[in-house]
Image (cartoon, rainbow, N blue to C red):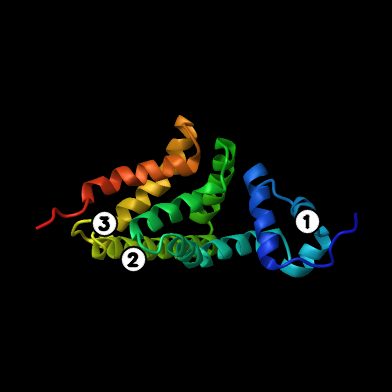
Amino acid sequence: MARPRSASTEQIVAAAIRVIGRVGPSRLTLAEVGDEAGLSAAALVQRFGGRRELLLAVARHGAGSVPELFDRARERFPASPLNALLDALAEGAGAVQTPEEISNHLAFLQMDLTDPEFHALALQHARAMLVEISALIEEAMAAGELGDCDPDGVGRTVQNSYNGALVTWAIYREGTLAEWMRGEVEAVLEGYGPAPAR
């Protein structure tokens, strides 16, 4: 079967993310990503310049795609910011299916923590997540789904729960990651339930 002449950057990044899930970033090759995307390794070199640049494109995509993730959740739950929050976090984790994939994606985090270019994008991603989480918490307060609280402080707690759940699910291995994630975040938010009616 002939390879397509081109693929969008988004399609290539999605292919690279799938390969990272299977083999981790250190064992990723342009040939394997090319096979996944239906392109030659040479085409990827021409598009990105090399393996590092492709991995940076993956990190850049992650940082830039956060608002879209939360916008989709708002569209699915227009009357419930709280459900939109839970849905966005579950969708963000839903692509990972196995503990091995978690391990391979955590290997990407090692680059985020040690390489300045990757760290800048990881920080951008984390800040974007916190902005979106806090905004939905504030909207949930306005809708009466949560009681009065500090949206940024609770947002950080939710973000920490989200990140921690990635690791704890890989250890406990109960249900799907999305289900585990939702349960952990719901447990955090129970303490900020709606204020009693006056």
The dot on residue 80 is: none
Real-space Cα separation, disc 1 to disc 2, in angstroms: 38 Å
> Could you tell me which residue is drawn at 64 percent across and 48 percent down?
20
As rendered, which of 147 and 38 lies closer to the eye?
147
In the figure, residue 182 lies in which quadrant?
Answer: top left
Residue at the disc numbered 1:
34
What type is the residue that disc 3 sits on?
Glu
Residue at the disc numbered 2:
135
Residue at the disc numbered 3:
145
Task: Answer with mark 1 or mark 2, whichever residue precedes in sequence.
Answer: 1
Q: Residues within 10 Å of mark 1 (few under 14, many from 20)?
A: many
Q: Nearer the viewer, mark 1 or mark 2?
A: 2
Q: Residues within 10 Å of mark 3 (few under 14, many from 20)?
A: some
Task: Answer with mark 3 or mark 1, whichever residue precedes in sequence.
Answer: 1
Residue 73 at x, y percent in the picture: 45, 60
Placement of the C terminus among the 4 image quadrants: bottom left
Q: Residues within 10 Å of mark 2 (few under 14, many from 20)?
A: some
Real-space Cα separation, disc 3 to disc 1, in angstroms: 46 Å
Describe the element under mark 1 as helix, strand or loop: helix
Describe the element under mark 2 as helix, strand or loop: helix
Vertical arrangement, residue 15 with respect to residue 120, above or below: above
Q: Nearer the viewer, mark 3 or mark 1?
A: 3
What type is the residue that disc 1 sits on?
Gly
Residue 107 at x, y percent in the picture: 56, 46
Residue 100 at x, y percent in the picture: 59, 37
In the figure, residue 70 lies in which quadrant?
Answer: bottom left
Q: Is residue 82 left or right of residue 107?
A: left
Q: Is residue 64 left or right of residue 29?
A: left
Task: Answer with mark 2 or mark 3, whichever residue precedes in sequence.
Answer: 2
Real-space Cα separation, disc 2 to disc 3, in angstroms: 13 Å
> Could you tell me which residue is drawn at 90 percent across and 54 percent down?
1
What type is the residue that disc 2 sits on?
Ala
